[in-house]
Amino acid sequence: MRILIAEDDLTSRTILSAVVKKWGYVPVAVTDGEAAWEAMQKEDAPQLALLDWNMPGLNGLEVCGKLREIDTADPPYIIFLTSRSEKDSVVEGLEAGANDYVIKPHDNAELLARVRVGQRMLEMQAAMNAAKKSLTHEAMHDPLTRILNRRAILDFLQKELSRAMRHGSLLSIGMIDLDYFKRVNDRYGHQTGDDVLCGLVRTIQENLRDYDLVGRYGGEEFLVVAPCSSGGEDDELYERLRAGIAGQGIATRSGVVSITVSIGVVGTTGSRSMDDLLADADSALYRAKKSGRNCVVHAEKV
């Protein structure tokens, strides 16, 4: 772990750097508050800071306050290491955002214990952030296919509709339904059916562009959100998807299973509500099913 040592006194800074290094940490020593602030802005910024109060430029209290103004999930652990022993100073330092306050002259064993407390707090913070990130990912993704779930893809669609309206750009929505999926489940079983769904998603992703997104809308239905520069561009996109799926069997535990999809498409510049657009895409999909499946139908042609 990297530890910032912000101390303007050369002797104190040198001794403290040597002690911190002996403890097994990496000292990052600076001579004033401005340098301390700059060090904490870097990509490899120290996770823990030992701040003197009285320094040239920014003092320790000001550095602490600026660090606490940063909105981050990984704030540094800050320990004031200062000769200011007045009760009011201790209170002021802690209220500025410091996690701990050590008065000079300090005992190295006590300081090490406090640094280790800080390290444990940082490790707990990192573990909580990782758990939160994992829970957020799980809340947004379909557990089988690992793509966005219905709620997440609809949230993304709403944001893209707002963006399309602001910029006057074209957005296409494709509703994809796996043809005769019930027959797959009846013939091969639901585990093979799951293999087919996962394989279908991989094929869809292989045929999408980097800025397109697909989510599981429900059951064997998937929703594609794709920015387009023209109506002809979305024609090419969804026909490529349809042909790519029809021309490529899905490897499953029961062998290779051939599938096709029907696709309903609607284009918009964001001027209509999401519910209306989804209803149009669903109507186009219904028309595709009625037209024999394995085809793409656009809402404007319904």
Image (cartoon, helix red, strand yellow):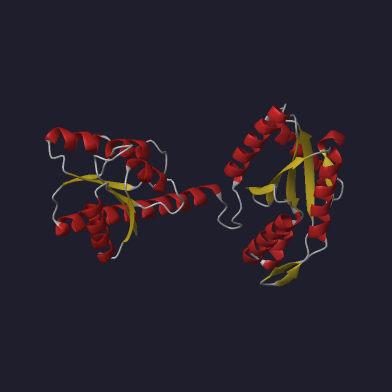
For this rendering, which residue is in front, 142 or 8?
A: 8
Q: Position of residue 291 (x, y in %)?
A: 87, 46
Q: Nearer the viewer, residue 19 or 100?
A: 19
User: Quick one: quadrant of the C terminus?
Assistant: top right
In the image, is 268 to the left or to the right of 131? right
In this rendering, is residue 243 above or below 176?
A: below
> Looking at the picture, how far across and down is residue 117, in whole percent?
23, 54
Front residue of this view, candidates 86 and 138: 86
Residue displayed at 16% across by 58% down: 108
Looking at the picture, how far across and down is residue 131, in whole percent? Answer: 41, 53
In front of the other: 37 or 244: 37
Identify the residue shown where x is 28% and y is 63%: 21
Up-down: is 193 above or below 292? below
| Residue 73 appears in the figure | no
Looking at the image, residue 66 lies above or below residue 126: above
Residue 25 placement: quadrant: bottom left
- Residue 51's spot in the image, x, y percent? 27, 45
Q: Dividing the picture into quarters, in which one does residue 28 lie? A: bottom left
At a point 82% along the width and 53% down the height, the residue shown is 240
The quarter of the displayed image where residue 174 is located: top right
Q: Residue placed at 59% from the left, 56% from the top?
A: 146
Q: In the figure, is residue 117 to the left or right of 171?
A: left
Q: Is residue 252 left or right of residue 260?
A: left
Q: Quadrant of the N terminus?
A: bottom left
Q: Is residue 162 visible?
A: yes
